[in-house]
Image (cartoon, helix red, strand yellow):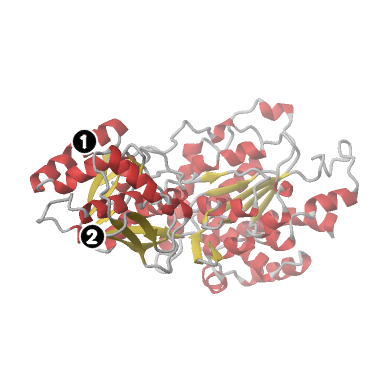
Amino acid sequence: MYSVIKTATVCGMEIRSVEVEVDVSEGMPSFDMVGFLSSEVKEAKERVRTAMKNSGFALPPKRIMVNLLPVNLRKVGNIYDLPVAVALMRSMGILENNELNLDNWLIIGEIGLDGKVHRADGVLPIVCYALMEGYERIIIPRGNLNEACCVNGIGITAVGSLMEAVEYICADEEGRREFDSKNMLEILENAAVKDIGGTVEASFRNEIAPDFSDIRGQKAVKRACEVAVSGMHNFLMIGPPGAGKTMIASRIPTIMPEPDFEERMEITKIYSIAGELKSGDGLITQRPFRSPHHTISLQGMVGGGAVPRPGEITLSHGGVLFLDELTEFSKSVLETLRQPLEDGKVSIVRASGRYEYPADFMLCCSSNPCSCGYYPDRNRCNCSIQQVSRYLGKISRPLLDRIDISIEAPRISYEELGRGTGESGTSAQIRQRVKETQNIQKERYKNIGINFNSQLNGKQVEKYCKLNKDLKDYMASVFEEMNLTARGYHKILKVARTIADMRKSENIEEEDIFEAVMYKGIDEKFFSEVTG
């Protein structure tokens, strides 16, 4: 007997439909699976066979053929076990429910040898795909219910075992409705989630965060940090060890406004595909903050593998990628950041196809000025100019050109350690100012598809970052004296636009340009003078 069950798979950020065909016929007993399968999918036949036996459904001594369509799509992952088992039992005549049309259902899930259904990766984007394609219902593992419930408009059934899936499919309409009600109530009570605006939202790594008021001194650095976050500009801090660079960077998430619903959905989809969501996690409500170690590989940063998975730059999408001790990262890893910083996405090409991941993040970096960390303080630094040049030379000019704001973080004095928060304020106060500035940008750019000043292209810079004649003359001299590229020139104008927005000014004034130029002047001090 022949049967088909619909499922789906993740290809990059795209979801592709897959059909599980099963034919059970007379002949020499066998169990074969075909359809361009990876090793973990090929092994599904042994998991399914044993799980069915332990659930009370023995396979008949017949010829069993399973085919996964389309055959030109590589099948990978842990989501095919449950649809294969359901299709097999449907062919065996076990699922007797003539009134039920499974052709409009989507089924995903991994099965253990004991018949239990385990959580899978990429469930949220698959549920969104099922809704867009008009499927009536989707059956998922119970461990994925919280993330799946972020989507409204489609029937979602979470099962904990193969037996539960069979009982649900064979039940009448009233029985299935009762199962869904009890199942949802139990899951929500156990997960302690709350209903907000028609969506189910669970806390995601919601630890008590440190506050900006913990930072003593570094008034100029904190100001530069606020400017960077207000316009989502790339940010570099240079200074000696112990100046507070890492401490400031770790507090950037506390001054960033929370993402809206669409951004939360996109971030959660990425983490779902990457397998970064834990059982019970729902919609991610905070912007990502990723801080990879400097020994990270090229694949770990960009993503990839035989079956590409998101890397750190994609996991930072919508948030911050912090590279501590920038010069300690390998040059090849750093150079891979150049294209994502410009395009806001990363493309990975493999023999199996082209995979594209979003990578629109704020880059935050910190670096010592030399190997000992104390240049240009010659009372403490013994590095030669050649050693300093070699150390800073690990940061290429093209990468440095993509950093909007550079600031020196000097050594903290003893007197500054005893001072209060000063003018910067707490994280909540700074976050409110940042939110007001970002709202100005979102309103200004609502019709052109961007949200922040840092995203302006060349033509948009000319339109939204206009200067009067005196400022144009000043910028002409700055362009020549600082040997700026066109990109560097536009970076200064975009930062000036953000500073003007922080003052709630329609026009860019002298003070805005002067401050923006100062943030590029640090490049001259540490890179041009030393590296030439």
User: How many numbered markers are drawn?
Assistant: 2
Point 54% across, 74% down: residue = 459
The quadrant of the rendering that contains the N terminus is bottom left
Mark 1 or 2: in front is: 2
Q: Residue furthest front?
A: 28
22 or 492: nearer the viewer: 22
Q: With respect to residue 489, does 211 lie above or below?
A: above
Q: Is residue 390 left or right of residue 40?
A: right
Residue 11 at what x, y percent from top left? 44, 61
Q: Secondary structure at mark 1?
A: helix
Q: Residue furthest top?
A: 418
Q: Is residue 264 left or right of residue 172?
A: right
The quadrant of the rendering that contains the C terminus is bottom right
Residue 525 at what x, y percent from top left? 79, 53
Point 30% across, 36% down: residue = 193
Residue 465 at what x, y percent from top left? 55, 67
Q: With respect to residue 265, does 488 lie above or below?
A: below
Dot 2 alpha-carbon crowd within 10 angstroms: few under 14, some 14 to 19, many 20 or more: some
Could you tell me the amino acid type at mark 2?
Tyr
Residue 115 at what x, y percent from top left? 31, 39
Could you tell me the amino acid type at mark 1?
Leu
527 or 102: nearer the viewer: 102
As measured in the structure, the alpha-carbon distance from the residue carrying label 1 to the one carrying label 2 is 23 Å
Residue 185 disc label:
1
Q: Which residue is mark 2?
A: 135
Q: Residue furthest bottom?
A: 459
Residue 253 disc label:
none
Name the N-terminal-most of marks 1 and 2.
2
Q: Is residue 136 left or right of residue 445?
A: left
- Is residue 413 among what the camera can see? yes
- Is residue 430 among what the camera can see? no
Q: Secondary structure at mark 2?
A: loop
